[in-house]
Amino acid sequence: MIMDMTTTLAYNPKAARFLDAAFDEELSLRRTQGRQVRALADFAARGGSRRSVTEEVALRFSVTRNHAFLLVETSCALVARLPNTLAALERGDIDLYKASKVMQLTREVSDEVAAQVDAWLTKRLADRDPGAIRGSVRRAVQKFDPDGYRERAAKKRALRHISLEHDDETMSTLSGHLPTEVAGSIYASMSRAARSRRNKDKSRTLDQHRADIFAERLLAENGRGKPRAHIHVYVDFLTLVGARDDPATLAGYGPIPDWLVREIASDPGSTWSRLITDSATGQLLEAGGDKYRSPASLARLIKARDRECTQPGCHLPAEVSEIDHIVPRARNGKTNHHNCHIHCKNHNLLKEEPGWSAVPTGDGGMIITTPSGHTYETAPEPFHEPRTGPEDDEAQT
């Protein structure tokens, strides 16, 4: 007797109801996003310059500047140039993420071309995934604007760049925005080298070999020699010697575990600087200065204390940012550690926008007031928790 061993899953009406209920909530969320889009477009029309509007949204929503910019840009484009796509969002046919794909691929075309693409997409949005929608938009843009597409492609190839995005558990993503054929060639070259190594070393996966080759090629001096990394790590002395397991801080990334910082510190090429903190607050000790240009000692203290841009939501490392006055020098702002802090170039420019102001609270902290009247308080993170016990007092030496 031959038995049919095929497993058949029975229809589960209760499970189906849960899925349907979840999808109903998804439809409600999409329609809510449609209302949010109109509200953001209205705010953008009345809230001042695009920079000012973007920064206000970033603070109000507690998101990054880039996220806020995408929200504002998508909202304005949907309302002004893509009415059919906005209608699909308000019906619940698509979500805001899918709508943003239409915006991103039409942001540089004329209003006439955008209208043609938007109309062509009317029946090509519902029940499709983001990749499929992106492909349709790309085809439509080439269809209605072939010459413009060619010109934009040439300009974008001139804007090639690399970018860094920090992930979790001590990992980050380094990516290159390159011409397609160049990126493909690089990946193929690394893959060939990785397969060759994999044949000799089975202890690492093909992906691990490929990633290691990528790092080696980029870090080696002039394409040859041992890789050398240049990073800034801030670590408590007791953590460094293994007496504590408090996290250290990697500039531009955030907390990293004690075992990793000890690995970095043990490298023969590492260099060291001594920073002294106040045991009661965890902040660096005071340093003064009356000159307009920060003295070297004050500059070192501010960069070490702040570690990154002090605007909420911005994490650009201090090494690539600027020292700025919270109260400007022109308004009798002093050059000292209370009134000076780290700001990236974008947020240095923000203070020139109408309606923006900041009041120092000490040690680089400040209260920011936006043109809409909202306030936000920020201060550099302390290097460690306050210490008052005998063991903690020893850590100050």
Image (cartoon, helix red, strand yellow):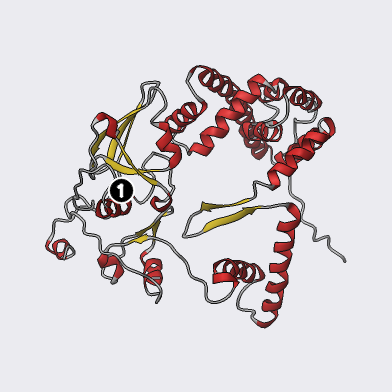
- Left or right placement of residue 9 versus residue 302 in this view: right
Where 119 falls versus 2 (above or below)?
above
Residue nearer the viewer, 187 or 227 = 227
Where 223 falls versus 372 (above or below)?
below
Q: Quadrant of residue 16?
A: top right
Q: Quadrant of residue 276?
A: bottom left
Residue 166 in percent (x, y) is at: 50, 53
Residue 58 in percent (x, y) is at: 46, 33
Residue 113 in percent (x, y) is at: 77, 26
Q: Quadrant of residue 348?
A: top left
- Left or right placement of residue 367 versus residue 13 in this view: left
Where 134 falls versus 178 (above or below)?
above
Amino acid type, callout 1: Glu
| Furthest-right residue in this view | 1
Residue 11 seen from this side = no
State the residue at coordinates (34%, 60%). Answer: 248
Circle 1 residue = 381
